[in-house]
Amino acid sequence: MAAVRAVESGERSAAEFFAEPKPAPRPRRAAPAARPGGPGGPQAVPGGGPVAVPEGVTALLAEGGAPAALGTALVETFGEGAEEVLRADPWELLAVPGVAPKQADGFARALLGPEGGPGDERRCRALAVWLLERAALSGHTVLGPQALAEGLARYGVPDAETAVGEAIDAGAVLAFEDAGEEAPAAGAAGTGSTVAGEEEEEGERPVRLLVGLERHALAEESLAEGLARLSSTFAPPGEEEAVRWEEAAGRAPGPSAAELVRAAARGGLVAHTGGEAARAEPAALVAAARALGLRAYAAAHSEDGRRRLAELLDTEGGGGGGRSDGQDGDGPDGGMGPAAVTVDGLLAGREGPGHDEEGAYALDLLAVLDAPQLDAERATMLVEAVPDGARLVLSGDPHLLGSAGAGQVLADLLAARVCPQVVSRTPDPGPVGELVSGIGIGELNQVEAPGREVVIVPVRDAAEAVHRTVQLVADSVPRALGVPAELTQVITPGHGGAAGTRVLNAALKERLNPGPGRFGGFDPGDRVAHSPAPGHTALGTVVSGDEEGLRLDCSGRAVTVPRERVARTVRHGWAITAHQAVGTRWPAAVVVLPGDAVPALNRAWVYTAFGRGERHLSVVHGVDQALPRAVERIPAPERTTRLRTLLRAQAAQAAPSPETAD
């Protein structure tokens, strides 16, 4: 459309768009910008003023019977043209976070009258996009067309299969043919369907149809290309440099660390897996690379992970300590600045090496820890900024809960087998480590805990679970183990329910920091979880509040949350979910399993939650045999993605033909 307008206005010649393009060098990369509400969003503009809602938008909401409070979110979603967008298609209201189909239907009926029926093409398109966005929250980048049609049928779409085709024809969703590894069950939720009318020949992989949103498709395709680029542009070290790398491997603190150093010496892309103790191995690699004079950095998912990584790097002499803002400094890092950063800080440009003249990161090696927490879009932003010829190591624990966004980057990279893989043999120490390691392979074992490192607290109902949790945090753990309440974290499966985060936080606040909630329900000293976007949770403490918003201290970083965003993005944080806790550890953790938590339990959830305590784990246990059953029989739900297929296709293109090999 931009091209058509340019030609019609005379600004450009039609020949420009039809002439054969000349071969061009690889495009100059710009520094990755933070997405609205994403990494660095609210922090980048602290204390930003309230969003101005035009009178036309307010009037439109009133006409459609929608609450005026939606005005801010509408303008944030659609900009100044929000009124025009919704008058043309009222179901676009579904694009606003928190709006459900029932609400959008009521809004559309109020504006359109009888014309706004359940089969309206605009409604079908908006619902298809909404369902795919909902699937992305469960990690899927694509769905099978049958799964999407079933979702549309649940919301009253008359001919759901036809509606899927119309959404594809309209460009609202994209269709893909994917050469799967095996034929999926027809109509299985989240899977594709074998192409109709095609018979599978013996020895050929079936082709499945998939549908998805453009942004997820572009992210996975760009990510596959970026990872293939790093592999193809890497030049193996010369003889003298190879000797130096081998000497560095010989100085590594253990055999797994030595294996990782050797793998990174020989390849531009390496995958590394292991538990908490294995985090020392990429730290040892970064320290070794810095000792060789390379610009090497390691990125963690959370600020706590960055701090622990910095401690490991200091131990290895890799310059991990000091400031986390990416500024250069003197010391053992050779003037390159701190080696330990956070992924969000790196993406937002707050931390790390800065960018070179081409817009790429000024580095030679980047080790990304907590790689299972990378969704496809953030991973793409990261990989696109890694320069040609640099080394990238994706490291993490594959047993943990996956990313809050769409994709499973490390799992797909491991499954594609397109790069060297190093599996750590370093066990996690202590009774908690022994317990969690068993859970990772589907075994819930009793462990010896002479120092009360693991304690099981049986409860009969949710009320008792809340009472015992408060007692553990406020009394038992501080008295028996010397761990204060502020260093003990409560973890529960969900926000709702009789023992979810809302109920637990209310009880813990009353005991630990009672107050009237004078700043939008919060008081100075309250522990909070700030989530400006799905998958981006920063834990902190309330400092104060004023007309500009709620002022927080998030691991030493000052954050001001504007008043209109507090209710949507800030919760009390004495109790959080396991998804919010990923990437962070505390001296003590209390995991609450009330009876209504059974449907949420699976092996990945239990593994993640139980592994958040460094020295102590208390389990408030009210689910009886559902806990061992979840560990033994219920792995993490499957995610439907395209990345592994795209990676294999890239590898096949890069492989030399038999004639070339000869």
Image (cartoon, grey):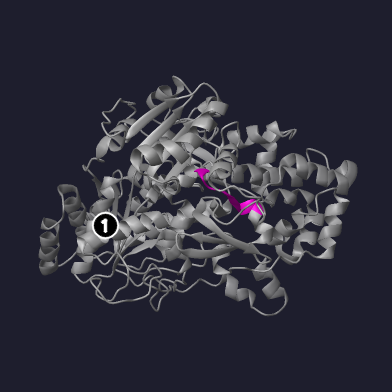
Amino acid type at image mark 1: Leu
Horizontal side of residue 609 vs 454, given as left or right = right
Query: What quarter of the picture does the C terminus occupy?
Result: bottom left
Horizontal side of residue 279 vs 573, given as left or right = left
Residue 609 visible, this angle? no
Horizontal side of residue 224 vs 237, given as left or right = right
- On the image, the x and y values in percent for residue 281 come to 24, 52
- On the image, the x and y values in percent for residue 21 come to 49, 72
Of residues 201 and 572, the one drawn nearer to the viewer in this rendering: 572
Residue 465 visible, this angle? yes
Query: What quarter of the picture does the N terminus occupy?
Result: bottom right
Dot 1: element: helix
Depicted 520 relative to depicted 6: above or below: above
Residue placed at 45% from the left, 69% from the top? 350
Could you classify mark 1 by the number of other residues whose Cα lies within 10 Å: few (under 14), some (14-19), or many (20 or more)? many
Of residues 429 and 474, the one drawn nearer to the viewer in this rendering: 474
Which quadrant holds residue 79?
bottom right
Q: Give the residues drawn in magenta, as a range.
A: 567-575
Query: Is residue 65 on the magenta stretch?
Result: no
Depicted 83 relative to depicted 503: above or below: below
- On the image, the x and y values in percent for residue 125 come to 70, 46
Residue that badge 1 annotates: 312
Depicted 550 relative to depicted 589: above or below: below
Residue placed at 82% from the left, 46% from the top? 108
Residue placed at 54% from the left, 32% from the top? 466
